[in-house]
């Protein structure tokens, strides 16, 4: 049993609670760290318990708080998943979270849980290539129409005329991947609230603001505080943080939305395995110190790149000035610029590839948010599935390189970038 009262718990910071919250050592032989509950199924003390637990899992009756509902089967609930979910919800300041086997599983399950054939979405582009493909191809064939508007300061004005009674959601990645463009989540929420309910009978029956916060990570931005109804993560990135695990998260405050996500996760089976959840929980303990060191390094790397003659322009939140239209959004939505930098090199694919091929400390690999620095070419890699027109419109051109800055010594990173740029 924790010695902390509920009131004491609420005054503690997430980085403190990340070490203990949601786990009672006395239920596990006094173990200080949660064991891995590698079991597919859980024994009921009596048949009546089994009946009750199933009814609650189906949303029937008056269920007690989720953590008291009883363990059934690891596709529905498991202690490792619940500890992870409790702690991620704490970081976001949100009511509850569900973990998934990947970011795409979180996104796909959430969109299926909240949309029906005939619904429309507004999507602030660019979005991650996998999300783009999901929306353009799978959801389209399922009868959901998406309207794309460019992420950035004008997104709310461009979105408003597209809203109609079939609009179910506004989907935002802010900062957008890979452009680092910011969209004003609060203004999108105002839009969502100003328009008539989609169908008051549906879970949270109005236009939903759904934010993929993978790029900022939970340390530097908490989208629900500025209006997001649902926050999504590829936990593979900053939450996992070591490029050794793939996972995802979906968070919400509204009980009906949480229930819909839970039901769809159980039906579609996209939960993580207990060991994945355990690894992600372990990583949460160092999330803040990793993210802060990565940010300090990125600030130095961005300052180096911006003055390099072979670099045409740098997209990094830390370079926004009050003269930039998105600066005000940054101040509202972020507590730090994070560690993702995209930059345009003078030239095209040939120059970008020459630079990437000469890196020695940076790994030439997709993904982001990990302890090691990574570099990749969005047009040929993460965003290769976009149409040529979309690539041009969203700035995913052949001269664009994306860097994810890790925790190495920043002098070594700058040395590496310098020597690779000299080879171009
Ligand atoms: C912004 C963003 N969202 C979602 C995803 C998908 O996550 P996962 O690879 O964990 O399925 C990614 C992956 O790169 C991403 O960058």
Image (spheres, rainbow, N blue to C red):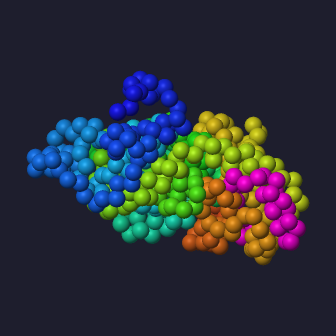
Residue 157 placement: quadrant: top right
| View extreme (bottom): residue | 350
Say which residue appears at 42% left-offset and 58% top-offset.
275
Q: Nearer the viewer, residue 285 or 198?
A: 285
Q: State whether residue 4 appears in this view.
A: yes
**As drawn, 163 above or below 364:** above
| Range of magenta residues | 398-424
On the rendered image, what quadrant is the C terminus found in? bottom right
On the rendered image, what quadrant is the N terminus found in? top left
Q: State whether residue 165 appears in this view.
A: no
Q: Position of residue 13 (x, y in %)?
A: 53, 32
**How many numbered marks appear?**
0
Say which residue appears at 53% left-offset and 40% top-offset.
222
Q: Position of residue 144 (x, y in %)?
A: 39, 61
Q: Position of residue 313 (x, y in %)?
A: 79, 56
Residue 378 placement: quadrant: bottom right
- The answer to if 179 sits in the magenta stretch is no
Horizontal side, residue 288 vs residue 46: left or right:
right
Horizontal side, residue 236 vs residue 194: left or right:
right
Say which residue appears at 52% left-offset and 35% top-offset.
16
Q: Where is residue 10 in the image (x, y as percent from the top left)?
A: 45, 28
Horizontal side, residue 29 vs residue 349: left or right:
left
Say which residue appears at 49% left-offset and 67% top-offset.
133
Horizontal side, residue 414 vs residue 276: left or right:
right
């Amino acid at each position: 049993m924790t010695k902390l009262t509920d009131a004491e718990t609420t005054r503690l910071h997430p980085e403190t609670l990340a070490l203990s919250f949601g786990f009672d050592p006395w239920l596990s032989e006094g173990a200080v760290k949660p064991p891995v509950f590698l079991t597919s199924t859980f024994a009921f003390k009596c048949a009546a318990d089994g009946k009750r637990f199933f009814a609650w899992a189906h949303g029937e009756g008056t269920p007690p708080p989720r953590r008291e509902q009883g363990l059934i089967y690891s596709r529905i609930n498991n202690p490792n998943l619940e500890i992870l979910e409790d702690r991620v919800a704490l970081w976001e300041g949100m009511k509850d979270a569900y973990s998934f086997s990947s970011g795409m599983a979180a996104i796909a399950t959430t969109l299926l849980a909240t949309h029906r054939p005939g619904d429309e979405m507004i999507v602030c582009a660019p979005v991650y290539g996998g999300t783009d493909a999901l929306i353009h191809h799978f959801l389209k064939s399922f009868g959901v129409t998406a309207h794309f508007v460019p992420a950035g300061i004008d997104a709310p004005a461009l979105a408003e005329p597209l809203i109609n009674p079939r609009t179910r959601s506004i989907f935002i990645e802010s900062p957008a991947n890979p452009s680092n463009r910011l969209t004003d989540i609060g203004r999108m929420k105002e839009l969502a609230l100003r328009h008539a309910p989609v169908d008051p009978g549906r879970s949270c029956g109005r236009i939903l603001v759904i934010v993929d916060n993978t790029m900022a990570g939970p340390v530097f931005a908490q989208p629900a505080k500025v209006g997001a109804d649902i926050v999504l993560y590829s936990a593979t990135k900053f939450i996992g943080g070591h490029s050794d695990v793939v996972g995802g998260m979906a968070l919400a405050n509204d009980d009906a939305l949480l229930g819909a996500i839970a039901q769809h996760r159980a039906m579609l089976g996209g939960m993580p395995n207990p060991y994945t959840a355990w690894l992600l929980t372990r990583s949460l303990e160092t999330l803040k110190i990793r993210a802060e060191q990565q940010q300090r390094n990125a600030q130095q790397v961005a300052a180096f790149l911006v003055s390099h003659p072979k670099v045409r322009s740098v997209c990094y939140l830390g370079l926004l000035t009050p003269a930039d239209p998105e600066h005000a959004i940054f101040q509202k939505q972020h507590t730090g610029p994070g560690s993702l930098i995209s930059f345009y090199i003078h030239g095209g694919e040939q120059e970008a590839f020459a630079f990437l091929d000469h890196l020695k400390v940076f790994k030439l690999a997709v993904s982001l948010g990990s302890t090691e620095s990574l570099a990749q070419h969005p047009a040929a890699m993460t965003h290769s599935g976009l149409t040529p027109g979309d690539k041009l419109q969203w700035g995913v051109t052949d001269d664009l390189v994306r860097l994810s800055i890790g925790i190495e010594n920043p002098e070594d990173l700058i040395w590496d970038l310098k020597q690779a740029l000299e080879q171009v």
